[in-house]
Image: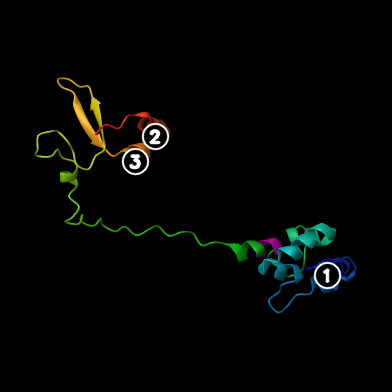
């Protein structure tokens, strides 16, 4: 609404007889209930700002004959969201034939100890012998800020 329409509505709200605002339609709804059901926030705000008695009715603090819900309860009913349904479980699909994960993470047969799909290695001391773990820099860096800093500051050796 523009300013003249807002001023006109304010004058009607403040000066119209109570019977107009308390009039119920065939479903038992008053003017404020309809504003609530239609989520007309402009009207609801105008009522709260300008009409002290209407504000009480809007909040359900003033009694209106034969009306079971307060107008704000109508607004709640109009905006209720349905509870989300639990996702259906689907069994995982078999990895495609072209995705040879064990071979991608295994050392090559050349004997040089390289792993073709990794671009970094972690040497971890152990007993009786140290172990070497191969990984992808981008995967390691995505796990935490500390690891991202470690990867960013570590030298790349071919």
User: Quick one: which residue is furthest to the front in this view?
Assistant: 158
Whether residue 91 is situated above or below residue 4 in the rendered picture: above
SS state under label 2: helix
User: Quick one: which residue is furthest to the top in this view?
Assistant: 128
The reply to whether the magenta stretch includes residue 156 is no
Q: Position of residue 77 (x, y in %)?
A: 61, 64
User: Quick one: which residue is furthest to the right in this view?
Assistant: 15
Q: Quadrant of residue 107?
A: top left
The dot on residue 120 is none
**Residue wearing tag 1:** 5
Q: Residue at x 32, y 38 (%)?
A: 137
SS state under label 1: helix
**Image quarter hosting the C terminus:** top left
Q: CA distance from mark 3 to mark 1?
A: 59 Å
| Mark closest to the chain's N terminus, 3 or 1 | 1
Local packing at callout 1 (Cα closer than 10 Å; few below 14, some 14-19, many 20+) is few
**Image quarter hosting the N terminus:** bottom right
Nearer to us of marks 2 and 1 is 2
Q: Position of residue 157 (x, y in %)?
A: 26, 31
**Residue wearing tag 2:** 148
| Mark closest to the chain's N terminus, 2 or 1 | 1
**Residue wearing tag 3:** 138
SS state under label 3: helix
Q: Position of residue 24 (x, y in %)?
A: 75, 75
Q: CA distance from mark 2 to mark 1?
A: 59 Å
- For the image, the number of numbered tags is 3
| Mark closest to the chain's N terminus, 3 or 2 | 3
Q: Nearer the viewer, residue 71 or 64?
A: 71
Q: Residue at x 14, y 33 (%)?
A: 113
What segment carries the magenta color? 70-74
């Amino acid at each position: 609404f523009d300013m003249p329409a807002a001023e006109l509505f304010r004058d009607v709200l403040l000066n119209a007889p109570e019977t107009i605002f308390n009039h119920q339609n065939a479903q038992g709804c008053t003017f404020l209930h309809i504003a609530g059901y239609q989520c007309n926030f402009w009207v609801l705000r105008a009522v709260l700002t300008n009409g002290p008695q209407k504000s009480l009715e809007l909040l359900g603090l003033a009694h209106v004959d034969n009306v079971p819900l307060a107008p704000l309860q109508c607004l709640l009913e109009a905006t209720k969201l349905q509870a989300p349904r639990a996702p259906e479980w689907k069994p995982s699909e078999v990895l495609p034939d072209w995705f040879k994960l064990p071979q991608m993470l295994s050392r090559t047969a050349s004997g040089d100890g390289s792993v073709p799909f990794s671009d970094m290695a972690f040497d971890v001391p152990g007993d009786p012998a140290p172990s070497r773990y191969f990984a992808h820099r981008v995967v390691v860096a995505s796990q935490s800020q500390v690891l991202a800093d470690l990867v960013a500051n570590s030298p790349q050796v071919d």
